[in-house]
Image: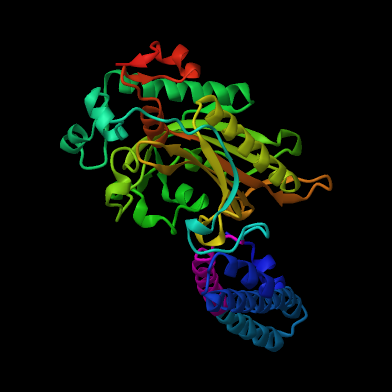
Amino acid sequence: MLQIAAIRDNIDQVKELLEIRNFKEFDLVDKVVKLDEDRRKTQHQLDAQLSESKKIAKSIGALYQSGKQEEANAMREKTATLKESNKQLEESLSSIEQALQEAMVQLPNIPNSLVPKGNTDEDNLNIKQEGTIPKLYEGAKPHWELLEQYELMSLELGSKIAGAGFPVFMGKGARLQRALVAYFLDFANKNGYKEIIPPLLVNETSAYATGQLPDKDGQMYHVVNDGLYLIPTAEVPVTNMYRDTIVGKDDLPIKLTGHSQCFRREAGSYGAHVRGLNRVHQFEKVEIVQIVEPQKSYEVLDEMVAYVEQIIQSLELPYRILRLCGGDLGFCSAMTYDFEVFTVAQDRWLEVSSVSNFETFQSNRLKVRYKDDNGKNQLCHTLNGSALALPRIIAAILENNQTEEGIVIPEVLRPYTGFDIIS
């Protein structure tokens, strides 16, 4: 959530930056500013009347002691009138604050000035592209056919058990998935990230604090009877570990990694482009999260981008790094880099990671702060990245490494899989 003071003091600049992400509801920005003005006026009036009420209450006793009963009674009547007025102001203030909050949570984050303008993924800025695109033998197959051929996964069984989009991995497919998770977590541990096994369910407060609610309400699985939500990423529970916390400056940066199952409804996702593992409702992912001092967050963003790049390089996959344009930017993000890997059998790029700096957007909701050198509480900056999401990584490994003899496992994974080839 944006900070109201930043909006109030820089309304024109806020509108200009929001326009980069094709946000057009400037009347909502004006509404926020107007509600904030009403809130401050009402609060000022209430504070003044409460102060006056305290002064009158003190004077009544003195008047009675002085025998000025008539004046004291008049003051009591004035106190009663003020009490009723204060009650009305408190109710009005509560109503204004609720309306302000409801308006504020509809505003997306302000993009960094380096975020390019654009409406779709075609307008994203290609920062870097590396890796050799392999040439496959004639008759090479897309991963959904390879998964069936080698009995690595079944969407049909998943549909039988749960519904469409819930894969069942088996045999070497299950072992490959487990190997990737172990490798990604070991990589994170070697780079100073503290490993977390988080809950797979969060309450509404947690989902709100990291920005999934209300923005992604329709995309989350909701356990209505318990008021809980299945997590779309480990970022949600891991970051919420520090909700309502003041951390020491010496404790920053906080580096956390979490492996979890992830659940996304992905409503409206149909067609050939989402076949197989390209888009599923349940998948595994290793997430990295950092909580840092504001002045260091973009340096940390670059470090996290380099970190993800090293993992993809180690898997020997051709990749590119994109800086997302305003129209493709997530609701909470100030800047995001996407990683895409090329799959030869599908002849297309697949997104496998997003690395984002949220600046204070999440921390303002979370109320995660640190004490600066002057002892004042300041909002931290939060960042997160996929390192990595498994489905499309598996798809790329299977498709790009297929040979007539079988699917060759990347060398870095072989100590984890226990086999060199799927045949």
Q: Is residue 90 magenta?
A: yes
For the C terminus, which image quadrant? Answer: top left
In the rendered structure, which segment of residues is drawn in magenta?
A: 86-110
Q: Residue 95 placed where, x, y %?
A: 50, 73
Report whether residue 87 is seen. Answer: no
Q: How is the image coloured?
A: rainbow
Instruction: Return the residue found at the far left.
Output: 160
- Find residue 311 and report its image quarter: top right
Q: Is residue 279 visible?
A: yes
Magenta residue check for 267: no
Nearest to the observer: residue 249 or residue 358: 358
Query: Residue 362 location in percent, x, y?
Result: 58, 51
Nearest to the observer: residue 225 or residue 147: 147
**Main secondary-structure element of the magenta-colored stretch:** helix
Quadrant of image for the N terminus: bottom right
Side (left or right) of 274 relative to 75: left
Closest to the observer, 55 or 74: 55
For the point 37% across and 46% down, the residue is 229
Examine the rendered structure and indicate whether residue 240 appears above or below residue 212. Answer: above
- Measured along the vertical axis of the image, is residue 105 above or below residue 33? above
**Residue at (80%, 46%) from the top-left corner?**
375
Residue lying at 56% horizontally and 58% vertically, measured from the top left: 325
Q: Quadrant of residue 59?
A: bottom right
Q: Residue at x 54, y 38 (%)?
A: 241
Q: Does 64 appear above or below 357? A: below
Residue 177, percent from left and from top: 38, 25
In the depicted view, which residue is nearer to us: 17 or 415? 415
